[in-house]
Amino acid sequence: MRYYPVYLDIKDRDCLVIGGGSVGTRKVLTLLSCGANVTVVSTAATEKLHQLSNNGVIKLKERPFQTTDLDDRFLVIGATDNQELNFNIHAEAERRGLLCNIADRPKVCNFILPSIVNRGDLIIAISTSGKSPAFAKKLRKHLEKEFGDEYAELLKLMGAIRKKLLSQDHEPEAHKHLFEQLIERNLVQMLKEGDTESINSLLLEVLGEGYEFESLVEIQVIDT
């Protein structure tokens, strides 16, 4: 099996999770972190799912799955311990042309979920095409040590710089060498060490006046 790597924008999309155990709960939390509208259907649910439901964060339907639960969905995840039910979910989702993932059953998925390293806007996805989730997990732990929170700060800063440059009618292609200089001059290490003085010195040298770290970060926070 060869997979086509893609990142989905599921913000405000209606997504369905069938199964309210620990696996289903993890799937729900990931969907929520990406801005999805989540409905959970399950005869039983974890305390966390009940909390989310009580707070109006998700819709929780504590009953058996019905095929009509798939109506108007963008994406569905099956996370039950009933394999017959999981296969039925897959078959009905396929019939409707929906994106469908069945937890730990890649043969009945039309997409699989990678192991993820998340550092703000930096998302590193690791996939073994379903061959070895254990190795994907090991690699994720290795990358988590290599890529710390300073990379999230780097992208915030780069985003603020890019927006300011574009506001001054700079062509995007003209920025390339500027960003390359910032990266090659060890900006990420300065961020890791919290060395604001060196950061501002570098920004002044590469970009000129008006690109102070503190003001750029403030702009990014406001935009967020």
Image (cartoon, rainbow, N blue to C red):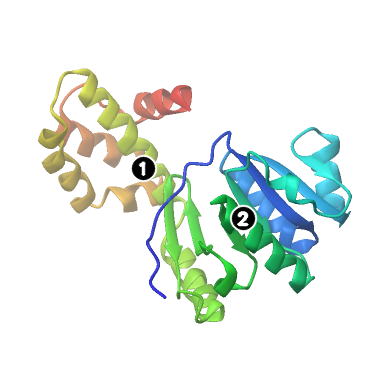
Q: Amino acid at mark 1?
A: Leu
Q: Is residue 112 left or right of residue 39?
A: left
Q: Residue at x 59, y 70 (%)?
A: 108
**Which of the two labelled residues, at mark 2 and mark 1, occupies the earlier sequence position?**
2
Q: Mark 1, residues whose alpha carbon is within 10 Å: few (<14), some, or many (≥20)?
A: some
Q: Disc 1 marks which residue?
A: 155
SS at badge 2? helix
Mark 1 secondary-structure assignment: helix
The answer to which of 224 and 59 lies nearer the viewer is 59
Q: Position of residue 38 (x, y in %)?
A: 69, 42
Q: Quadrant of residue 128?
A: bottom left
Q: Is residue 45 visible?
A: no
Q: Quadrant of residue 32?
A: top right
Mark 2 packing: few (<14 Cα in 10 Å), some, or many (20+)? Answer: many
Q: Pick whichever, 142 or 88, lies toward us.
A: 88
Q: Residue at x 47, y 42 (%)?
A: 9
Residue 195, position in %: x, y?
A: 36, 44
Specify whether residue 22 is in view.
Answer: yes
Amino acid type at circle 2 is Ala
Q: Which mark is residue 93?
A: 2
The location of residue 67, given as percent across then percent down, is: 74, 51
| Image-based side of 46 in relation to 37, left or right | right
Query: Which residue is most to the top?
Result: 168
| Alpha-carbon span between mark 2 and mark 1 | 37 Å
Where does the image place residue 24, in percent across and percent down from the top left?
73, 58
